[in-house]
Image (cartoon, rainbow, N blue to C red):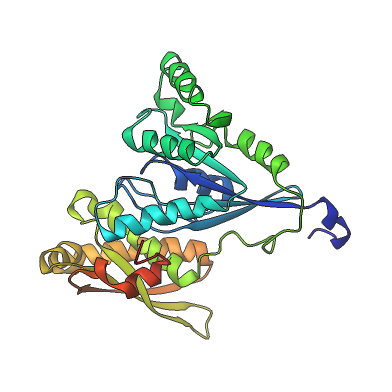
Amino acid sequence: MTDLSDISNQRAGFVAFVGAPNAGKSTAINRMVGTKVSIVSPKVQTTRTRVLGIMMKGDSQIIFVDTPGIFAPKRRLDRAMVAAAWGGAADADFIVLLVDAKKGICKETRSIIDTMKEQGRKAILILNKIDLVDKENLLTLTQALNEENVFTDTFMVSALKGDGLDHFVDFIAEKLPQGPWLFPEDQVSDMPERLLAAEITREQLYLKLRQELPYSTTVETESWEEKKDGSIRIEQIVYVARDGQKKIILGKGGQQIKAIGAHARKELEEILDCRVHLFLFVKVRDKWGEDPERFNYWGLDYNA
């Protein structure tokens, strides 16, 4: 623990990550924080709401804001997610645009840059997945992005491997405004455990079912009971829009949902550091994506 007399040396601030879907924002933040605070899957728009990941670097408390990928919204849920992304960046001390170096300046990245120009915002550029791009193309992309006159600094990383992230952390830790820490120094996220548990199960659904699973599927923690033996009993509901989707998740003889539950339980036990009894139920709720209560659960603005 840091002596209270050292409080004058403390720094704290918010660093918001924005970018196109699947650029690697959640992977980068999880890697820097050192534990999972935001779920990751190959499915686009996995992150649905603003998530804080908190890490300590010397006397600095860096509060990363992981936001949903910014894309052209088509539905109410899409609009709410994009609003959450820009809202997460609005009050941050620093904005980081994370770009998938393999995809380059895609239409979503182009739109984000144009919006920042219109709003007169500056950002730090992080080029991710540099291990998948040859040096010549990487330098060409870097030059093209920096000619936009939006970026103050540029970093090149591989979030999956962790390469280059230490340089960024050292840099941002020195740039944060001076002031007392905003969270206890052992806290890594502001996400309630019930919501994190639901996210872990949703991640397993995406990882196991990939393209078979509709994007509209969601998970909510229905009950959370801490037992006398130190274990936790969790009941969760997987909401789908149609009966056919329910059959996909259950699988033949219920084998698919059992496998999903087993993997989610194992990861929850590692995160919560205790035995977990996880029970999953699948329910059909037509048009749950139009239900204000569901938006409130996720901390999203229904009227965005």
Q: Is residue 203 visible?
A: no
Which quadrant is the N terminus positioned in? bottom right
Residue 23 picture location, percent across and down: 40, 39
Q: Is residue 158 above or below residue 197?
A: above
The quarter holding residue 167 reads: top right
Q: What's the residue at 53%, 27% (across, down)?
A: 149
Residue 154 picture location, percent across and down: 56, 28
Q: What's the residue at 47%, 66% (across, down)?
A: 269
The quarter holding residue 196 reads: bottom left
Residue 270 picture location, percent across and down: 49, 61
Extreme residue in the left direction? 244
Is residue 115 rendered to the left or right of residue 165?
Answer: left
Q: What's the residue at 25%, 62% (across, down)?
A: 217
Closer-to-camera residue (62/106):
106
Closer-to-camera residue (12/269):
12
The quarter holding residue 111 reads: top left
Q: What's the residue at 43%, 41% (across, down)?
A: 19
